[in-house]
Image (cartoon, rainbow, N blue to C red):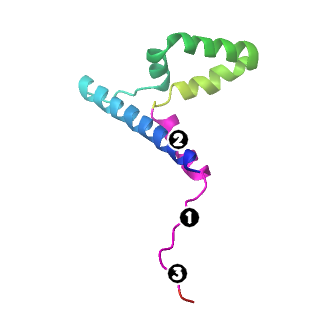
Amino acid sequence: MAVWRVIGWVFLVLALIAFGAEGVSSLSVGHYRLLTLGQVWFWLSPGSLNLAQAVVQRYLLAALWDPVIVTILLGPAWAPPLLISLLCFVAGPRRRRRMFFKRRR
């Protein structure tokens, strides 16, 4: 379906935006500056980040937050959208090629 491709392209654009923002912030500072997923989430909605931490620690598994989710949040902001876009491109059905001319056997 085309839905997988659209989702893949949307997440690829998000990854490129995050990568570009990391580059621009690095240029403005003068050295490489990693833009982490946790920073971006905190800038966009600090309340939802705190809520996600409370829900994971209270209702799911408290040990899941510290080693697993914190590691993901400390990674680059462009990595998760890039991974999701690649998964959408791979998991989505393949496009059929249209044959304008029939092949002779």
Q: Which residues are magenta?
A: 78-103
Q: Which mark is residue 7?
A: 2
Q: Residue at x 66, y 11 (%)?
A: 54
Pointers 1 and 3 in contact (C-beta within 8 Å): no
Q: Earlier in the sequence, mark 2 or mark 1?
A: 2
* Residue 58 locus on image (x, y percent): 73, 12
Q: Which of the numbered marks, if any, corresponds to residue 96?
A: 1
The amino acid type, in three-letter code, at marker 2 is Ile
- Reply above or below: 39 against 10: above
- Tell me residue 105's x, y (percent): 57, 89
Please tell me which residue is depicted at 47% across the width and 39% down the height of the picture.
10
Where residue 102 appears, as percent x and y from the top left, is 52, 81
Residue type marked 3: Lys
Three-letter amino acid code of the residue under disc 1: Arg
Q: How many marks?
A: 3
Asked if residue 105 lies left or right of residue 63, the reply is: left
First of labels 2, 3 by sequence position: 2
